[in-house]
Amino acid sequence: MKRITTILAFASLFAPVVVHAQRPVLNDAEVVRDSVQTAITRDRAEGLWAEVIASGDLKGSAVLDMVIDDKGRCESVLIRESDLPIKWKNAVKDQWFDRRFAFKLAKNHKQKISITLQFP
């Protein structure tokens, strides 16, 4: 019996440790909007469409209405107003549709937010 306990203790030292980080639950609409805006800004800072923006093909602005579900997933994206060409309206909308953000909302709660994007 002592031998089995020793073997189990030794095996547990080498067993992979799985850690699941909990995503924070957000309740305030402004905090949700700021979190989404931060994620979009981070994507653009990491080089999203950098070449197209630098070449001047992507210029203008867009106002997006987004619905975020309780799992932190973007459920719908509507471009309320924009001066972008149709091709880029679709690309901007598709980029964040069905995106899962690093937070979640209260159970069975959805949040509608409005995001303004500027492309120099």
Image: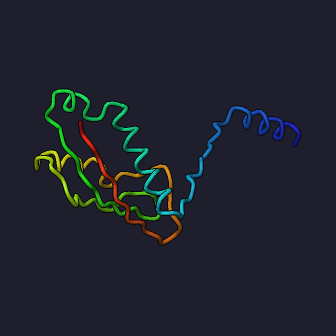
Q: Position of residue 27 (x, y in %)?
A: 54, 64
Q: Nearer the viewer, residue 17 or 118?
A: 118
Question: Residue 56, located in which quarter of the rendered image?
Answer: top left
**Residue located 33% across and 36% down the image:** 44
Colouring method of the image: rainbow
Question: Residue 40, located in which quarter of the rendered image?
Answer: top left
Left/right of residue 33 with respect to residue 95 in the rendered view: right
Most extreme residue toward the left is: 86
Q: Position of residue 95 (x, y in %)?
A: 27, 47
Residue 105 versus residue 119 in the image, above or below? below
Quadrant in which the N terminus is drawn: top right
Most extreme residue toward the bottom is: 108
**Residue located 37% across and 61% down the image:** 113
Q: Position of residue 2 (x, y in %)?
A: 88, 39
Q: Position of residue 15 (x, y in %)?
A: 67, 36
Quadrant in which the C terminus is drawn: top left
**Residue located 59% across and 47% down the image:** 21
Residue 65 versus residue 20 in the image, above or below? below
Q: Nearer the viewer, residue 44 or 118?
A: 118
The tally of labels here is 0
Q: Nearer the viewer, residue 74 or 53?
A: 53
